[in-house]
Image (cartoon, grey):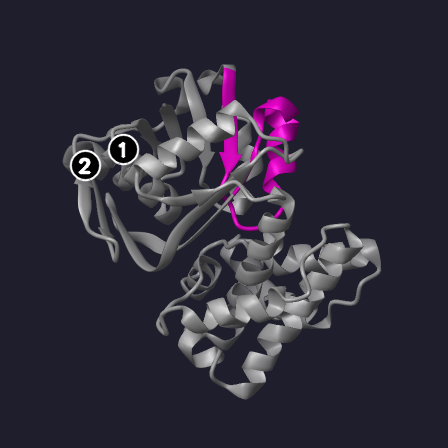
Amino acid sequence: MRIAIFGTGGVGGYFGGRLAQAGEDVVFLARGEHLKAIRDQGLKVDSIKGDFVIHPAHAAADPSEVGVVDCILMAVKAWQVEESATQLGPMLGSDTFVVPLENGVEAPAQLIAAAGESRVIGGLCRIISRIAAPGHIRHEGAEPQIMIGELNNHPSERTQKLLAAFHRAGISAKIPADIHVAIWEKFLFITTISGVGAVTRNPIGVFRAVPETRQMLQDCMWEIFAVADAKNVLLTEDVIMKTMSFVDALPASGTASMQRDILEGRPSELESQNGAVVRFGVETGVPTPVNSFLYGSLLPQELKARGKL
């Protein structure tokens, strides 16, 4: 498959790198010094699953340099999706489809608005990874996993084709029975550890061990569960227990990307995570006091990072 990685950060760099390593025709979209390093020295990936380098790596700054592809893996930050979606045109052929791998639950609708409903399938990933330096991705924790699925949950040739490409790359990937449930399960997890991690300014191993912040984790998850239920996304009753077990198995030093962005003074996915829970709560009449506290506590820093304060 010819696959474009729109956003070669911790997510796009890792999964795109694995696909390229397996022989898929992958082009990486990147910017600035990161792009220059990839072009000059290749894409270096350090991983708990084994280090590798893609050299030479096909990298571009603009979709017009790429041309038509079979699949676009959208791996920019959640707050960048709407703008990025307007740039997809040069890569879209008659059968091109787009897979969002963002945190949050709003990316599919944002991509549909720009590219059309028939082009978008649902997707999510699980990994702890980041850009360590220009041209250098570091996978630090969590078993890398991808889930994809048609938004109507019907089987399709294109999802099977992409699934096979991931499997050839040695990536754990599957098509769940309900992609919307899977996306919300990921949302429940990442929004909780992002918000609590950013407020406590400590890694996972610390805030999951302190009784008060551990309770905050669970309360935050239950609010998201209630919001999902109000939006007719039927999460299972044991999702909180399973998610807490997953949190307990993560490396103690792990941090979420939203937490890192906030602590380092960069714009973050706050509006797409805890902020989205608050908005959904208002829309559905579901109280969200913990997420409101997390969102309100972090908002001044977010506004400052965006030059609005």
Q: Splitting the image into 4 quarters, where does residue 279 fall?
A: bottom right
Return the residue at label 2. 42
- In the rendered image, the quadrant that contains the C terminus is bottom right
- In the rendered image, the quadrant that contains the N terminus is top left
Question: Where in the figure is residue 20, as x and y percent of width and height?
Answer: 27, 33
Q: Magenta span has 103?
A: yes
Q: Splitting the image into 4 quarters, where does residue 178 fall?
A: top right
Left or right, 233 with reference to 48: right
Look at label 2 and name its amino acid.
Gly
Residue 163, numbered label: none
Asked whether residue 99 appears in the rendered view, the answer is yes
Q: For the magenta stretch, what is the residue range?
A: 95-123
The residue drawn where x is 74% and y is 63% is 226
Question: Where in the figure is residue 73, as x and y percent of width and height?
Answer: 44, 34
Look at label 1 and name its amino acid.
Ala
Q: Secondary structure at mark 2?
A: loop
Asked whether residue 31 appears in the rendered view, the answer is no
Q: Secondary structure at mark 1?
A: helix
Above or below, comparing residue 4 to residue 16 in the picture: above
Left or right, 223 with reference to 23: right
Question: Where in the figure is residue 181, as x and y percent of width and height?
Answer: 64, 50
Q: Point out the tag, 2 or 1, that comes first from the N-terminus.
A: 1
Residue mark closest to the camera, 2 vs 1: 1
Question: Where in the figure is residue 126, as x and y percent of width and height?
Answer: 44, 53
Q: Magenta span has 279?
A: no
Above or below, comparing residue 111 to residue 229 in the picture: above
Spatial separation of the CA atoms under disc 2 and disc 1: 11 Å
The residue drawn where x is 55% and y is 62% is 189
Return the residue at label 1. 20
The residue drawn where x is 43% and y is 66% is 263
Sort mark 2 into few (<14), some (14-19) or many (20+) by Cα contacts within 10 Å: some
Q: Nearer the viewer, residue 75 or 235?
A: 235
